[in-house]
Image (spheres, grey):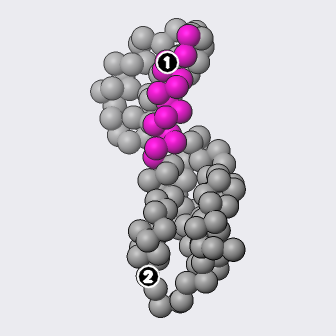
Amino acid sequence: MSDENKIKIIKPIIIPGLLYGGEIWEMDNARIERLQDTLNRRVRRAVEAPRYLPNQNLHEELKIKKLTDMIKERRKKMLENMEANTNNRIRRTTEIIYIVYNRCRGHKQSYKKNAKNIRW
């Protein structure tokens, strides 16, 4: 099987399996590194890349993004879909997600400002 076909298997099967639910988890760097290592090993084994080839070069050559970038894109897409939803409860949940996110990041002003606007 050609390397191109192997990558066509990795992208729709292995990567979604590694990222399943990644939009809603709070992932620390250790977890992301373990997932990235798993992906690197699978890709390297699939295309039979030599050990001395840097992972960055391997990913650039095969056009595979880093997991952190994929997670950010998925989170952004999920929140955009939630904001565009016509269901009021889903939109309110999106507001709460933003509040919690900002609060965890130390943005107390936006937390206080947005907390008043939420009604169940």
User: Residue sitting at 63 percent across and 73 percent down?
Assistant: 2
Q: Which mark is residue 84?
A: 1
Helix, strand, or loop for circle 1? helix
Residue 118 seen by the camera: yes
Q: Is residue 84 magenta?
A: yes
Place of residue 13 in the rendered image (x, y in percent of width and height, measured from the top left): 69, 56
According to the picture, the residue beneath numbered tag 2 turns out to be 54
Q: With respect to residue 77, does 45 lie above or below?
A: below
Residue type for callout 1:
Ala
24 or 106: nearer the eye? 24
Q: Considering the numbered disc 2 on the image, is that residue within a helix, a strand or a loop?
A: loop
Residue 14 as seen in the image, left or right of residue 96: right
The residue drawn where x is 61% and y is 83% is 48
- Quadrant location of the C terminus? top right
Q: Give above or below for 57 relative to 15.
A: below
Q: Which residues are magenta?
A: 72-86
Give the main secondary structure, helix, strand or loop, of the magenta stretch. helix
Real-space CA distance between mark 1 and mark 2, rounded to the nearest whole angstrom: 41 Å
Q: Callout 2, which amino acid?
A: Pro
Camera-side residue of 41 and 94: 41
- Image coordinates of residue 114 in percent, x first then y, are 39, 19
Q: Which residue is most to the left?
A: 109
Judging depth in this view, the residue of 93 and 112 nearest the camera is 93
Mark sitting earlier along the chain (1/2): 2
Q: Position of residue 118 (x, y in %)?
A: 48, 13
Indicate the quadrant containing the N terminus: top left, top right, bottom left or bottom right.
bottom right
Q: Residue at x 62, y 60 (%)?
A: 8
